Amino acid sequence: MKEGYKGYKSYEYLDKNKDYKSFELSDELNRVEPYFIPLNEEQEKKVKRIIANHPVISLHDHPSITPKDVKELMDYEREGRECTAFEGLAHSAWDAVFDNMMDGTCVISSKAGWKWTDVIHDIGIRSCDIAHQDFLIKGSSVEDIYKAKAEGKVAWFISLESATMIENELDRIEILYGLGARMMGITYSESNSLGSGLKEKYDGGLTSFGAEAVERMNKIGMAIDVSHCGDVTAMDTIRTSKKPVFITHVGARSLWNMKRLKPDDVIKACAERGGVIGIEAAPHTTITKKHCRHDIESFMEHFEYIAELAGIDHVAFGPDCLYGDHVGLHNLFSSNMSIGENTKGDAFPYVDYVKGLENTTEASHNIIRWLVKHNYSEEDIRKVLGGNIIRTLKEVWI
Ligand SMILES: [Zn+2]
């Protein structure tokens, strides 16, 4: 366990059920039987050395805990008070995590989500919780990643999957940056004033307002994510941005024909302009023809394909996990998250959870273990765990 963690639990500075409605939460580490890829003694030593020596970064995650009973999830989200998985992160290998907050489940005052006041509520309340503990460092720069690693802590970066809540107000990008956000998506799966989402029948590319938003994000140093954009909008953003762009949580459509995954030309364009592609692990996304049952093997098949296509200098990991019943959450928020459209394509077996990637703790360890087991060099592992992300962040953040 990371030495910086002293046992803090979310909102323990308040009185439960007096100051806020509390819910019985999922077990952070043992909700399902944990699975760690078995290794020999020499490989275990290599894993330890890598974790000790190199920054390990999740480019996209949701390290919060959901209620044990998934039926309570909608009420929990309406309260607008997600609990952070401090213990889970303390047992992970991550030195830094891009936390995408409530995103599609941000339904505090609205059924459809993505309202400005709700997003501000989410950022404020989570930041208040983070301010009352000292294990997560609220991150604003690359230096915070090195600081967290040196102190046995985790750098926590606020990230937003879509810019829908800025509506037609460019200044809101600065307000979000001022509140701590360091990365933002252009669209979610639905279109907004910036561009077209991946679920749409027609993709009009980046709007003129979207191009202005990209320019403003470049100027203030807000990293850009196009994971949920339509293909034309993603390509337009990559070409319009003066800084490299991230595709933080995705897989290759060439391996499985699904709208949520990206075609080769978008992946290549992102890499050619210095961007980084993070591999996605949320249930029923990164499956392949060879491994259509979602698990660590199908996920790593996407990694190997994209590393070959884009180059080892342009790939990383954005597992997009949470601590709780992720499949149950998808079922409940199916329309908010466009799950039906995201996964449209050939039939595949449904799983209750993704073996080896059940939560971001398990994902962090199994990614490293898989790479070591498959004889990747320490230098290549250093790049894909964090080196590539740091290089690009140094170009983007100013
Ligand atoms: Zn997403």
Image (cartoon, rainbow, N blue to C red):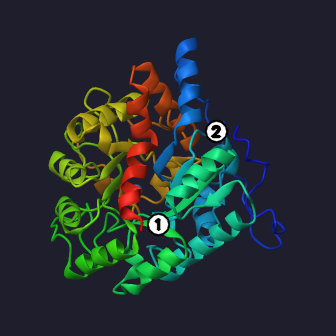
Residue 343 falls left or right of residue 89: left
In the foreground, 140 or 290: 140
Residue at the disc numbered 2: 31
Q: Residues within 10 Å of mark 1 (few under 14, many from 20)?
A: many
Asked whether mark 2 and ligand 1 are closer than 8 Å, the reply comes as no
Labelled pair 2, 1 in contact (Cβ < 8 Å): no
Q: Is residue 56 visible?
A: yes
Q: Secondary structure at mark 2?
A: loop
In the foreground, 398 or 373: 398
In the foreground, 306 or 251: 306
Q: Residue at x 76, y 71 (%)?
A: 20
| Among the 4 quarters of the image, the one containing residue 31 | top right
Placement of 193 over or under 314, stated as above or below: below
Q: Where residue 370 sits: x, y (%)?
A: 45, 26
Residue 193 falls left or right of residue 176: left
Count of picture labels: 2
Residue 291 falls left or right of residue 356: left
Q: Where residue 278 sits: x, y (%)?
A: 37, 47
Q: Secondary structure at mark 1?
A: strand
For the residue marked with disc 1, what is the amino acid? Arg
The disc label shown at residue 25, or none? none
Q: Where residue 312 sits: x, y (%)?
A: 30, 37
Quarter holding the N terminus is top right
Q: Residue at x 25, y 47 (%)?
A: 258
Q: How far, Cα to Cα, is label 2 from label 1?
A: 31 Å
Q: Residue at x 80, y 62 (%)?
A: 12
Dot in front, 2 or 1: 1
Q: Earlier in the sequence, mark 2 or mark 1?
A: 2
The disc label shown at residue 182, or none? 1
